[in-house]
């Protein structure tokens, strides 16, 4: 009889009849932080084959490191317009953006448009207002009427470069 009472007592305690409490699961909102990416598209034509370089210098990695990103594209002489596009990767931006127009030989380049975007911000530059957006070094002569760049050698050196002005980089970074 003791065994039956012990079994009934265990069965009673094991089969406790409490109301089911279910926790309400709240959905977790995943907020995607879309990484901004610097993209450049340049429409141009040139009369000589060379290598153009898009250079983003002093990109901050962390408080102790900086990096340079250079995108090199071989260009061929064209009678029509050619397009060069470059993407610098997520969250890579700096205060210096250089476009090197090739070091091999002197040439003429007609830039018809440059489209630069970073996240939601973008700049559209056409050949007529190229000098408003870009500074040009001493190896570059820009004719605003024909919208043509002519590169030149000085003291045996040939480093034609156009540099995006700081105020326009700042407007992209906002």
Image (spheres, rainbow, N blue to C red):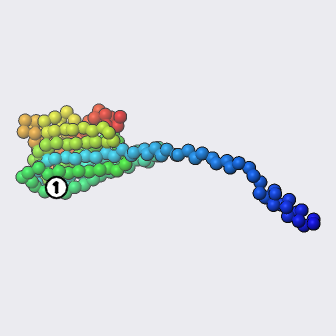
Q: Is residue 22 above or below residue 11?
A: above
Residue in the picture at 19% in, 57% down: 74
Quarter the N terminus occupies: bottom right
Spot the residue most to the right. Answer: 2
* Observer-nearest of 153 and 131: 131
Q: Is residue 62 left or right of residue 71?
A: right
Residue in the picture at 14% in, 44% down: 111
Q: Is residue 162 left or right of residue 77?
A: right
Q: Is residue 35 above or below residue 75?
A: above
Q: Image quadrant of residue 148?
A: top left
* Observer-nearest of 34 and 168: 34
Q: Residue 159 at x, y = what percent?
A: 20, 48
Q: Is residue 134 left or right of residue 46?
A: right
Residue of label 1: 75
- Secondary structure beneath dot 1 equals strand
Q: Image quadrant of residue 110?
A: top left
Q: Is residue 125 left or right of residue 174?
A: left
* Observer-nearest of 142 and 157: 142
Residue 133 visible to the viewer: yes
Could you classify mark 1 by the number of other residues whose Cα lies within 10 Å: few (under 14), some (14-19), or many (20 or more)? some
Quarter the C terminus occupies: top left
């Amino acid at each position: 009889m003791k065994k039956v009472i012990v079994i009934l007592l265990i069965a009673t305690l094991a089969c406790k009849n409490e109301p089911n409490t279910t926790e309400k699961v709240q959905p977790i909102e995943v907020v995607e932080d879309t990484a901004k990416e610097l993209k450049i598209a340049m429409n141009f034509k040139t009369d000589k084959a060379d290598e153009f370089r898009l250079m983003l210098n002093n990109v901050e990695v962390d408080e102790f490191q900086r990096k340079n990103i250079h995108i090199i594209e071989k260009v061929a002489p064209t009678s029509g317009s050619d397009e060069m596009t470059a993407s610098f990767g997520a969250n890579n931006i700096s205060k210096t953006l250089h476009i090197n127009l090739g070091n091999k030989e002197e040439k003429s380049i007609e830039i018809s448009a440059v489209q630069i975007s970073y996240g939601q911000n973008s700049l559209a530059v056409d050949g007529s207002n190229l000098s408003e957006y870009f500074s040009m070094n001493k190896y570059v002569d820009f004719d605003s009427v024909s919208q043509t760049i002519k590169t030149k050698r000085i003291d045996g050196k040939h480093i034609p470069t156009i540099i995006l002005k700081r105020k326009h980089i700042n407007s992209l970074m906002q």
